[in-house]
Image (cartoon, grey):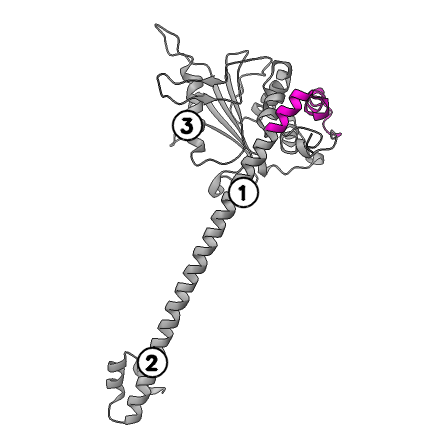
């Protein structure tokens, strides 16, 4: 077995689904969702006490329609649907993708036949191993809750569709700074694969189970192989992204150097032309035939420049 540390990496497909996507570990998912929604600025409808896993693979309405595949898809005891995804890296149309995925959980609620269009709540949760580009949010803000709102008075127009995003790289709290269950879950997700033992601050029973389920040494050979393959895919994916970034930086540097060389050549030519004008003006002035005004008109220099020669 390769050296993968003591605990699994939750950013891998195997790791995330092992902890949150199995019936045996649904209490971990319930605890995480309650901690996540407990941070809501809007009215929370109540504590989640149970979840039922739904099919995480959805097809479109017709041939050729794109397929949605969710990391974890479940419904709670009040009928709310949660799509929970671990996003390894930034995508160009990430927000579009997030909205597209949420529509699957909305559209599947439509029964055949007559219907009054009543919908249950849909929550799309994105655990992001990157930050939104262009500093969209302040550095200290890593949890974002988005609803459909009126742009004039900011009231919630529709409260049954909610997007919650966690910018994980922004979470920098240490063990001593953890003050809530949400803090503790953020810390675990962000640091699990680098920990050598369970921190003393995480004494809740749910974390006892989490660390037991995350310990690689307890897996059978089949689970270890699956995790190793998932970890390799994760490493290959991040390595590909890093390589692309380095190539982009290198191309940018090369373009910058070429631009600098071109600007240098242009500047050199301009300086040469300026020196040539001054030399011509000196010769004309030495002849004593033309006035300063005539020399200025002939060379393009100013009267002050001619007089200073």
Q: Secondary structure at mark 2?
A: helix
Mark 1 neighbour density, 10 Å: few (under 14) some (14–19) many (20 or more) = few
Q: Quadrant of residue 26?
A: top right
Q: Say whether disc 1 or disc 3 marks the residue closer to the N-terminus.
A: 3
Q: Say whether disc 2 or disc 3 marks the residue closer to the N-terminus.
A: 3
Q: Which residue is mark 1?
A: 242
Q: Give the magenta range.
A: 200-229
Q: Which residue is mark 2?
A: 276
Q: Say whether disc 1 or disc 2 marks the residue closer to the N-terminus.
A: 1
Q: CA distance from mark 2 to mark 3?
A: 67 Å
**Is residue 63 left or right of 199 when viewed as pictured?**
left
Is label 1 in contact with label 3 (beta carbons under 8 Å)?
no
Q: Quadrant of residue 222?
A: top right
Asked if residue 66 is among those painted magenta in the image, a careful observer would answer: no
Q: Secondary structure at mark 1?
A: helix
Q: Which residue is mark 3?
A: 149
* Depth order, front residue of 298/78: 298
């Amino acid at each position: 077995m390769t050296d993968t540390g003591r605990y699994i990496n939750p950013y891998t497909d195997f790791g995330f689904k092992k902890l949150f996507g199995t019936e045996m570990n649904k209490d971990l998912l319930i605890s995480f969702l309650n901690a996540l929604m407990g941070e809501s600025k809007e009215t929370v409808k109540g504590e989640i006490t149970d979840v039922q896993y739904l099919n995480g693979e959805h097809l479109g309405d017709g041939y050729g329609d794109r397929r949605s595949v969710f990391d974890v898809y479940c419904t709670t005891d009040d009928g709310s649907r949660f799509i929970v995804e671990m996003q390894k890296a930034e995508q160009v149309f990430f927000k579009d993708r997030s909205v597209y995925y949420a529509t699957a959980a909305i559209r599947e609620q439509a029964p055949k036949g007559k219907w009054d269009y009543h919908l249950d709540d849909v929550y799309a949760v994105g655990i992001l191993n990157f930050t939104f580009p262009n500093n969209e949010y302040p550095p200290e803000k890593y949890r974002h809750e988005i609803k459909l709102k009126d742009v004039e008075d900011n009231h919630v127009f529709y409260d049954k569709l909610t997007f919650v995003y966690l910018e994980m790289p922004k979470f920098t709290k240490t063990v001593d700074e953890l003050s809530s269950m949400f803090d503790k879950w953020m810390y675990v997700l962000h640091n699990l694969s680098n920990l050598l033992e369970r921190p003393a601050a995480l004494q809740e029973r749910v974390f006892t189970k989490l660390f037991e389920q995350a310990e690689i040494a307890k897996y059978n050979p089949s689970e270890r192989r699956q995790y190793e393959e998932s970890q390799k895919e994760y490493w290959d994916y991040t390595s590909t992204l890093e390589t692309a970034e380095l190539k982009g930086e290198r191309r940018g540097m090369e373009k910058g150097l070429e631009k600098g060389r071109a600007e240098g050549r242009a500047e050199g030519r301009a300086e040469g032309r300026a020196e040539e004008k001054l030399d011509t003006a000196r010769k004309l002035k030495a002849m004593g035939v033309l006035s300063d005004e005539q020399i200025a008109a002939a060379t393009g220099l100013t009267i002050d420049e001619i007089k200073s020669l």
